[in-house]
Structures are given as C-alpha cells and as structure tokens.
Amino acid sequence: MELNNKTMRRIIFIICFAVILIWLVFLPDSVNQVFSRIVGIFSPLIVGCITAFIINVPMRAIEARLFAKKPKLAKLRRPLAMVLALLFCLAVVAFVVMAVIPELVQTIYLVASSLPPYFGEAADKLISWANRVFQETPELLNAINAIDFNWAKIAQDAWGFLQTSVTSVFGSTVTIVIGLFGGISNFFIGLIFAIYLLFAKETLTRQIRMLLYAWLSRRRADRVVYIASLTHKAFSSFISGQCLEACILGVMFALAMWIFRFPHVMLISVLIGFLALIPIFGAVIGCVIGAFLILVQNPMQAVWFVLMFLVIQQIEGNVIYPRVVGKSVGLPAIWVLIACTIGGTAFGLAGMIVMIPIFSVLYTLIGESAKQRLREKEISTEKL
C-alpha cells in the first residue's frame, strides 16, 4: 500500500479513533471528570446558546411579521422582536408560577393539617398495643429492665454524632449557597451572551461558513452546512411542536376536569401541561402528582382521575403527539418512542428532550443516503 497523504490521514484517523474508544471504555471515571470540567468551564456559554435557541423561536416569528410593510422602521425590528420574545417567555413562566404556587401551598397546608389526626390515632393504637403486650408477657418487661445502659457512653456518642451532623449540615449549606449563587451568575452571564448571539446571529453564521469553506473542501463544507441547517430546523420544529402539544394537553385536562368537577383544575392542568414538555413520560409524572393531590380530598375521585388520564393519554399518544411533534420533526411515531427510550436511559431527562431531533436528523440523512445508493444501483423503490 502506497503511503500517500490520503493513506496517512486515514491511518492517523484510525489511531486517534482507537485511542479515544479505549479511553471511553476503560477509563470512564476520567472521562466523566474531563467532561464535567469542560461543562463547568463553558457552562455560561452553554446556557447562553440554549437560551438564545429557545428565545429565537418566538423571536423569529415576531420579527417576520413586525413592520413588514414599513421598511423605514426595519432597524427597530430586531431589538423590539427580542424584547417582545423575552416578555413572552417571562409571561409564560409567570403564568405557570402564579397558577401553581398559591394552590400548591394551599394543598400542602391541607395535607399537613389532615395528617396529625392520623398520626395521633396511630400513636394511640401503638401505645395501647405495647401496654397489652407488656401486661401479657411480664418476662419481656423484666428483661428490658435488666438491661444495663451505659448512659455516659450513649451521651458521648450522641454528642459526637451531633457535632458531626452540624458540621456536615453547615458544609452542605455552604456548598448549596455557593452552587446557588454560581447558578444564578451563570444564568445572567448566559442571558447576556444569548442577547449578543441573537443580535449578531447572521454575522456569526457568515463567519462560521467562511471558516468552513476556507479550511474544508467545497463538497465537505456544503455537507456540513446542510447538516447544520437540517439540525437547526429539526430542533426548532421540535421545540415549537412540543410547546404546542403541551398547551393542547393542558387545555384538554382543564376542560375534562372542569366538566367532571375535579378539584385543583388550574393547578393540575397547568402542571400536566408544563411537565408534558418532557416527551412521552412527562404527562405520567403529572398524573401521579395530580392523583395524589386529589387523593387527599377524595380517594374515589382520584381513581376516576386516573381513568380519565388513561383515556386522554391514549388520545394524546396515538393522535396528537405523533401528528404534532412527530410530524413537526419528520419522524414516525415508533421512532419518537425509540428516541425517548434511548435518550432517557442514556442521559436522563435531557437525553429524552434532545434525542428526538437528533433522531430526526439521522433519520433524514440515512433515508437520503439509502435513496442515493438505490439510484446508483438502479433499484426502483417500487420493488421495495
């Protein structure tokens, strides 16, 4: 085999791939440490990119309709669209908080006020049972009295445990406070970075394309630009479709609960709609929370609520979700379920959300590649 430049590049690529694969398989702890370190360093930028991507969805729709017939006001289109998009996102968050928090506090108060009688009855039954056991078996009481307790040792151990617990709690409190302030600072830095990204997104896109075409061949650069465009479209469509599906599901639950006179209509419907942003399984979490809240007031209504959830979930899972979210990302329903399962198993909640658009991109690319190969082999799709 002739060792030309192309062959050398292949050999170097294979060696690097083998080294990375061995590192991933045999040193997972070091991989996690390196990955966590990188994420920690770039976390404000990552938060900013995610925030910019989310805000860009309503901002793009507002900007396309704002001052469309007034070119003289075109310079105001971008900043005004950004402000309106930010206000829209804040309004959504405020609505969820105002709808959920007050009623949730009231529900927690009702639960807390109803628990002491149950605990009091249980304590009385336990005490009467213990008295009856000691009266029927005096040998047990004598054996307990015969036990010699070293109260000094017990007090010393308790004091040592108390000191250790206080130190641990203090250290955990300091860690939580530092992490909280770090998270808040990362969010605000990311928000500022997101605003800069949204203002200069065309310039940044043009600069990235310039670097691609400068350092890669024209064919590879075209391929990278196409995949990036396909990925952006898939993620944007998924976010808009997921939000639409969550709104539809929340409205369905609100109407059904209002018709059948269930309690906590606003709280549970908003909670289910918000959790429905988690693909497939988010509504199930909302159902568990809603059933528990209703169970406190009326156990029988909780059973009917679960039955109502199963009916609505069947309609949502078989009719709404595949057509709204699956259609928006161009992914069949079976692949949506597979993407959620694999993403959730591998990466948890974030994997469930991210894996659907990734599968959509892979589904499109593999389909295009398969059709191209069939055309090269002169195989008609009618035979398949």
Image: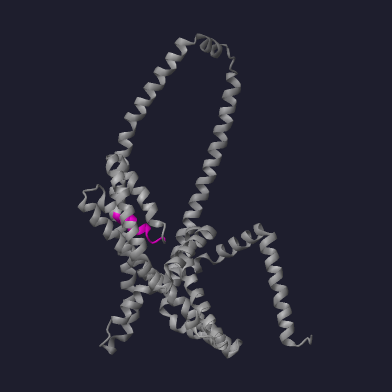
Query: Residue at coordinates 54% horizontally, 14% vertically from top-left?
Result: 144
Query: Residue at coordinates 59% horizontally, 31% vertically from top-left?
Result: 160
Question: Does 199 appear above or below 300?
Answer: below
Q: Is residue 25 magenta?
A: no
Query: Residue at coordinates 65% horizontally, 57% vertically from top-left?
Result: 29
Q: How is the image coloured?
A: one colour
Residue 211: in sight, yes or no? no
Residue 260: in sight, yes or no? yes
Q: Position of residue 148 (x, y in %)?
A: 59, 14
In this view of the protein, which residue sits in the foreground, 216 or 222?
222
Question: Does 293 appear above or below 129?
Answer: below
In this view of the protein, which residue sits in the foreground, 169 or 17?
17
Number of on-image labels: 0
Query: Residue at coordinates 29% horizontally, 89% vertically from top-left?
Result: 71
Q: Position of residue 35 (x, y in %)?
A: 60, 63
Task: Using the rendered view, name the quadrant where residue 224 is placed.
Answer: bottom right
Q: Is residue 273 magenta?
A: yes
Question: Does 16 appear above or below 155?
Answer: below
Q: Position of residue 206 (x, y in %)?
A: 48, 86
Q: Quick check: 95 left or right of 350?
A: left
Q: Which residues are magenta?
A: 269-278
Quarter holding the N terminus? bottom right
Q: Position of residue 13 (x, y in %)?
A: 69, 77
Question: Does 354 appear above or below 227?
Answer: above
